[in-house]
Amino acid sequence: MNFFARRSRGRLFTEAGGFSLFEILAVLVILGIMAGTATPTVGRIFDNMRFRQQAEKFSAVLRYGKLMAVTRRQVVALRLGEGEECVFELSGAVDESRGCDLDEEDVLTMTPGEIFFYPQGTATPALLTFEKGERVKKIRLDLLTARPHIE
């Protein structure tokens, strides 16, 4: 007889070789406690990811403005639209509007109020500040390269 066959007749296993109801309940309670402690952390992780994605989206709009100015060889102006909805308005070489997709508590400011991208690949220096509660991301637009830098 092997080890398990001898022990199955003893105290460790039941006759059928399964788990008792108490053992299953103990495992379920432990899993419930682990899930309860992990849920708030997972929620914060997803919220932080969304915050970073929004900052990246704003940076992509700046890169797009530069691309349009260089490829179309015309000045492109970018400004935040007025009103309740947050909208980036591009004019000059292109006439487009792009939504910001901000939540109610989010704040986006742009200094100066209008950014110009030039065909040589330069732009007016600018600062976009994105605030979501306590968190703040700043996106600086470089004067010479027109590249956005997220801080």
Image (tube, rainbow, N blue to C red):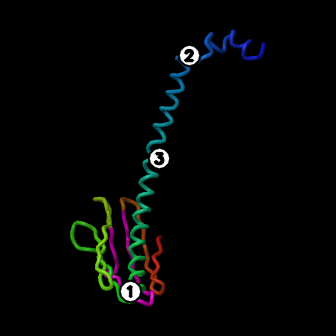
Q: What residue type is labelled 3?
A: Thr
Instruction: Answer with the quarter of the image where residue 52 lies.
Output: bottom left
Above or below, 134 relative to 6: below
Q: Nearer the viewer's eye, disc 2 or disc 3?
A: 2
Indicate which disc, 1 or 3, sits on the residue closer to the N terminus. Answer: 3
Residue density around tag 2, few if under 14, some if 14–19, many if 20 or more, within 10 Å: few
The residue that appears at 47% across and 32% down in the rendered structure is 32
Above or below, 23 relative to 109: above
Towards the viewer: 43 or 13: 13
Indicate which disc, 1 or 2, sits on the residue closer to the N terminus. Answer: 2
Is 117 contained in the magenta span? yes
Instruction: Answer with the quarter of the image where residue 138 lies.
Output: bottom left
Residue position for label 1: 72
Q: Residue 20 carries which label?
A: 2
Q: Residue 145 carries which label?
A: none
Q: Which amino acid does label 1 sit on?
A: Arg
Residue position for label 3: 41
Q: What residue type is labelled 2?
A: Ser
Residue 9 on image: x %, y %: 69, 9
Hey, which residue is sitting farthest front in the picture? 72
The residue that appears at 51% across and 32% down in the rendered structure is 31
Residue 82 on image: x %, y %: 23, 73
Q: Distance between the residues labelled 1 and 2?
A: 74 Å
Hey, which residue is sitting farthest left in the picture? 83
Which span of residues is magenta-colored?
Answer: 108-131
Hey, which residue is sitting farthest right in the picture? 1
Label 1 residue SS: helix
